[in-house]
Amino acid sequence: MTEAYAGYSIREFLLQAGEFSRQLLKKVRMDGMVFINGTQVEMWRPLDTGDEVLLVFPEEEKGAIFPHQGTLPIVFEDDDVMVLDKPAGIPVVPPFDQKEPSIASYLLFEYEKRGYPCTAHIVTRLDKDTSGLMLIAKHAYSHWLLTKKLDLISRQYVAVVEGEFREKEGLIDEPIGRAEDSIIRRVVSPEGKPSKTQYHLINQEKNYSRIRFKLLTGRTHQIRVHMAHRGYPLAGDTLYGGKKVDGVDGQALHCERLHFIHPWTKKKMTFTSEPPKHWEEFA
């Protein structure tokens, strides 16, 4: 314990230095344990310079998702976070049937196998048919630290769109809301939430163009909706007017770069992933 927090109670220290939410603090107080220099103590206990604080978090509720054995494409993992390179064709969480295989169900199976007492904490989601990098928090504390600063998590995507895209780069600033006739589909709408997508043309073919995107907001289907609104639906994105493409599961969209600040070490973390090889056959 540094001198700066000497005299603070454990509760004050966790709220300020640890950036705990009051809800998480309550869970630790009610069902977890706190140790100072190896001795279990109460939250009101004041700290001295040099004290070592150890927290034991309560076991987390697993929820309704059914665990499934499956391949977890782990790119990086430590005690606090996990980075996956998700393939297209599998949902991150089951949309309806909680027994459907998903990334979350694979995580729960792996955690049970390891005897790890946590549930699946998804920080950055991808659509079922979108591939690429996604961030997982391995416990409630790291999930809280990451999601309270979502604006510090940067994601870069690459996609193949239909047609010859003419603009080299720019910004799409169009609000997005739910379509009136669908619980899934989104549309550009004056009543929607502010949505901003930066784009940069990579290359252009006769029938397709490859474009790089950076999300400045995080709306559902944001890239898909913005590009369809511009008249360039993503290849294979039949939900938004695109044509089915042989060899492509759903839309040709891939998260190729993920950048975030590690919730505990505060180290800057950057990961990259190449888009699927079969994209080269048409763009």
Image (cartoon, rainbow, N blue to C red):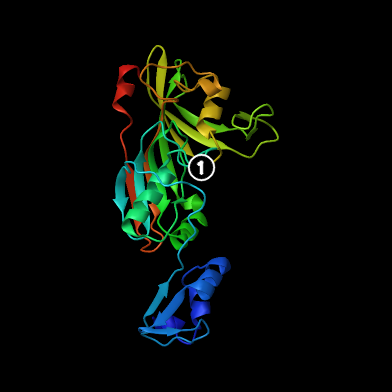
Mark 1 nearby-residue class (10 Å; few <14, some 14–19, many ≥20): some
Where does the image place residue 110, in percent across and percent down from the top left?
34, 51
Q: Is residue 16 visible?
A: no
Where does the image place residue 9, in percent across and percent down from the top left?
51, 83
Is residue 183 or residue 258 the one in the foreground?
183
> Image height check: is 256 above or below 139?
above
Q: Quadrant of residue 264?
A: bottom left
> Image height check: is 203 above or below 39?
above
Q: Is residue 25 left or right of residue 87?
A: right
- Could you tell me which secondary element the residue under label 1 belongs to? loop
Quadrant (top left, top right, bottom left, bottom right) of the C terminus: top left
What residue is at 44 percent from the left and 52 percent from the top? Answer: 120
Location of mark 1 (residue)? 98
What residue is at 33 percent from the left and 23 percent from the top? Answer: 279
Where does the image place residue 250, in percent across and percent down from the top left?
44, 25
What residue is at 36 percent from the left and 63 percent from the top? Answer: 265
Where does the image place residue 192, in percent across and percent down from the top left?
66, 36
Q: Is residue 119 visible?
A: yes
> Image height check: is 167 above or below 58?
above
Quadrant (top left, top right, bottom left, bottom right) of the N terminus: bottom left
> Image height check: is 189 above or below 266?
above
Q: Amino acid at mark 1?
A: Gln
Q: Is residue 247 left or right of residue 9?
A: left
Q: Quadrant of residue 111?
A: bottom left
Picture mark count = 1
